[in-house]
Image: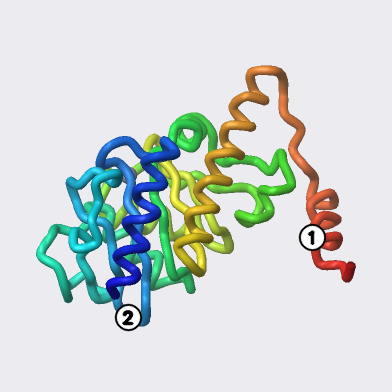
């Protein structure tokens, strides 16, 4: 599990450097088999060391490490229990949070939204760290790689931490484009036909 803890640090540092997280806001986890390595509670991600990251079983019991796991761990575990995700990234990045405070979904106004599953749902608000929030986020993620958390931030999942992290960067970019487009006029939402044509092109030979 040491490699996974090192990976958590690498992407934690990266998230802080890119301004996706400020201080202790935001948490990451990665799953291997029936174990989950998660970032700790109360440690700024830019100062994270591998030994700070506790290893838990799928019920959240500590297996290794004596630091307290992130307060959002129930959300991470609920999502691992109901998807085939192997990594999760949660941030309070600016544009994702802006959209999460005002919209009921992030509509697909750019075809790259397909990489996250199309429109991104906003999970209804619930207090951080609660089973209610975990349940709302789990439901909002159905069939998607990303969800927004009302008045809170964003979550992305992936088969690897690298892919979940890239999804967080894409979610933030899509939210920024949407917010800036709203400042200029009314953004046009791509139709189902237009999105289907992108999928067809992406999968066509050559
Ligand atoms: Zn949070």
> Which image quadrant shows ligand 1?
top left
Query: Helix, strand or loop at disc 1?
Result: helix
Q: Residue furthest bottom?
A: 33
Residue 37's image quarter?
Answer: bottom left
Mark number, residue 34? 2
Residue 30, percent across and down? 37, 66
Towards the viewer: 31 or 104: 31
Query: What's the CA distance linking mark 1 and mark 2?
Result: 34 Å
Residue 54's image quarter?
Answer: bottom left
Would you say 22 lies left or right of 180 here?
left
Sequence order check, earlier mark of 1 and 2: 2
Query: Helix, strand or loop at disc 2?
Result: loop
Q: Is residue 32 above or below residue 8?
A: below
**At 42% from the left edge and 44% from the top edge, which residue is drawn?**
149
For label 2, the crowd category at 10 Å Cα-Cα, with few meaning under 14, some 14 to 19 and many 20 or more, is few
Q: Residue furthest top?
A: 184
Residue 44, percent across and down? 24, 43
Question: How many marks overall?
Answer: 2
Would you say 140 lies left or right of 91 here?
right
Q: Is residue 35 above or below residue 12?
A: below
**At 44% from the left edge and 70% from the top edge, which residue is drawn?**
86
For label 1, the crowd category at 10 Å Cα-Cα, with few meaning under 14, some 14 to 19 and many 20 or more, is few
Quadrant holding the N terminus: bottom left
Quadrant holding the C terminus: bottom right
Give the residue at mark 1: 199
Q: Is residue 127 above or below residue 131?
A: above
**At 29% from the left edge and 44% from the top edge, which residue is drawn?**
46
**At 34% from the left edge and 69% from the top edge, which residue is drawn?**
4
């Amino acid at each position: 599990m040491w490699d996974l803890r090192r990976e958590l640090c690498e992407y934690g540092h990266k998230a802080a450097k890119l301004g996706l997280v400020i201080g202790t806001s935001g948490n990451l986890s990665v799953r291997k088999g029936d174990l989950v390595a998660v970032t700790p509670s109360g440690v700024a991600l830019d100062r994270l060391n591998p030994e700070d990251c506790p290893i838990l079983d799928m019920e959240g019991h500590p297996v290794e490490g004596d630091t307290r796991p992130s307060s959002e761990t129930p959300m991470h575990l609920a999502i691992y229990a109901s998807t085939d995700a192997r990594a999760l990234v949660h941030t309070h990045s600016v544009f994702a949070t802006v959209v999460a405070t005002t919209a009921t979904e992030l509509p697909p106004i750019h075809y790259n939204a397909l990489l996250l599953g199309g429109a991104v749902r906003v999970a209804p608000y619930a207090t951080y760290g609660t089973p209610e929030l975990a349940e709302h986020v789990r439901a909002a993620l159905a069939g998607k790689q990303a969800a927004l958390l009302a008045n809170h931030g964003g979550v992305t999942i992936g088969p690897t931490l690298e892919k979940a992290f890239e999804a967080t960067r894409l979610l933030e970019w899509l939210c920024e484009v949407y917010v800036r487009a709203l400042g200029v006029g009314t953004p046009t939402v791509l139709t189902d036909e237009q999105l289907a044509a992108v999928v067809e092109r992406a999968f066509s030979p050559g």
